[in-house]
Amino acid sequence: MEYIKPEETIILNVFTAADRIHSCESIRVSHRVDGTRERTLAVATKCDINPDGHFINQVMENIVNIRGLEYVCVRNRINDETFDEARIREAKLFGSHPLLSKLDKSIVGFPVLANKIVQIQLVIISKCLPNIGNKMISEKMSVLNLERNILPRDHPSVYNKITAYTDIVVPLRNALEKILIRGEYDEKELDNKQISCNARLKEMLDNFTKELHTSVSKFSEIFLIEEIQFVENTYGLRLPGYLPQFVFMYFLKEKVTTIAHFPISFVNEVSAYLESVCAKVLIDICGNSPLLSSIKKLVPNVIARMKKKLMKRVVEWIEVEKLTCFSSNPDFIASWRKIEENNHEQFSKSMSTHCEVINIEGHGMINVKHLFHVKPDIRNQAFELKMLTTAYWEVVLNRMVDFVAFQLRFRMHEMVNKEIVNELMVNGAGIDHILDEPESGSKERERLQRNIDLLQESKIIIEDILNDVRECQSNKQYIK
């Protein structure tokens, strides 16, 4: 049913000359989908085999009634007959057979069948093609023209370029300054932790600080072992009980090296976060602007440049900490003396009395049994190195956190107020560049225009076909 229901299909009811047509199921089915009989045709085959069949007799008696259907009688090709041979024998059959020659010539033969099919086809074309040409193609062209017209102009004026640039870059910079520098946000963004920039940066900085201070306890699980090994390796001809500065410097350098990856990881984490914030702000500012794809590519460039500068300063600072031990903070000396005074007497007493467990300020309860057999001079210098490092390490960590925080704030300010504008205006992404039609837009414009031209050409072709159909219908000559 689905194949014969469309109005542009031709229905052929084929049966043999011996069949009783009133019992033919295909005729009843075709009647349900083609009540007017305009596109249905009955074909009686094998007339040469059944020249006196039931259908032929009805034709002879002129009492055929196939529910108003037109019909044609034909002879089938037999075995290896060519088309021309079959048509010659068919014409001979309907011209000389005692019964079949009496049939009206307008209802016999394949040429008649072909002409009737063409007539039906022309009627269908004359009905369907105008609908395709005038309605369907016109509607499709309207849609394509609308899509083409809403595309941005491929050659905007200088004024339009500047206006479009200002409408995006200025709000973008203001939004970034509001979120990244001033730490402000709208009420609707209160629950959006990703946009609460100051809170997120403070959280990351606190985690960074916690990691640095936690790393202190990981230097050595056994008290003074690391310091003793270092003192023994640097032991030489010098006054006993005296700890030279270069020993402390070498030890400090190794300690700083063990934590150098923490500030680097922090810079990477912050840079990734800032890039996500900038990308979100850019999408909110640009909306569906055709400039979004062009400007969006600039965000990673700006962040990468800021990250490179920040990373360079952090690495330099790490090297500075390795080369110089200095603090102008008066609390450092007081802290060092307090730690040494509170712990030295207790440590010396435990070594003389062989007390295995003592309470060391800043380290808690410590087992010192493993130190009883260490040379007193080396042991005392190692203890002195431990106390000095404990006091100075707090200075190093706090100074590193402060430096990274100050540098981050400075680079963010520089990025928002300088780098964004430079990237758009100077570094290969000026007004002309970012407002040029992207390649994807140009290809879309060409595709739409190509389809519009094709539809216009199709309308002309359909009109030519309709003219030919009208001419054939007026001449009433279809196949010779």
Image (spheres, rainbow, N blue to C red):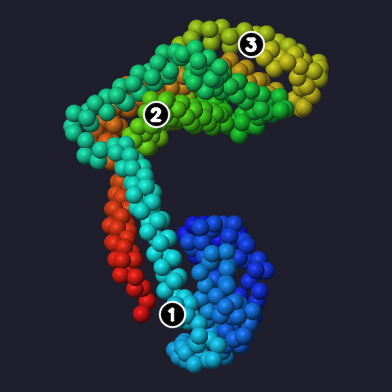
Q: Is residue 283 above or below residue 180?
A: below
Residue 111: numbered disc:
1
Q: Quadrant of residue 345?
A: top right
Which residue type does callout 2 highlight? Gly
- Which residue appears at 39% of the width and 21% of the height? 176
Residue carrying label 2: 287
Looking at the rendered image, the quarter that the C terminus falls into is bottom left
Near mark 3 (Cα within 10 A), the count class, few <14, some 14-19 or many ≥20, is some
* Dot placed on the residue nearer the N-terminal end, 1 or 2: 1
Nearest the eye: 53 or 294: 53
The reply to whether the C-beta atoms of the residues labelled 1 and 2 are less than 8 Å apart is no
Looking at the picture, how far across and down is residue 254, in whole percent?
Answer: 55, 31
Write the residue at 53% across / 79% down.
73
Q: 121 or 428, which is in the foreground?
A: 121
Q: Nearer the viewer, residue 376 or 74?
A: 74
Type of amino acid at the residue the image marks with label 3: Ile
Dividing the picture into quadrants, the one containing residue 14 is bottom right
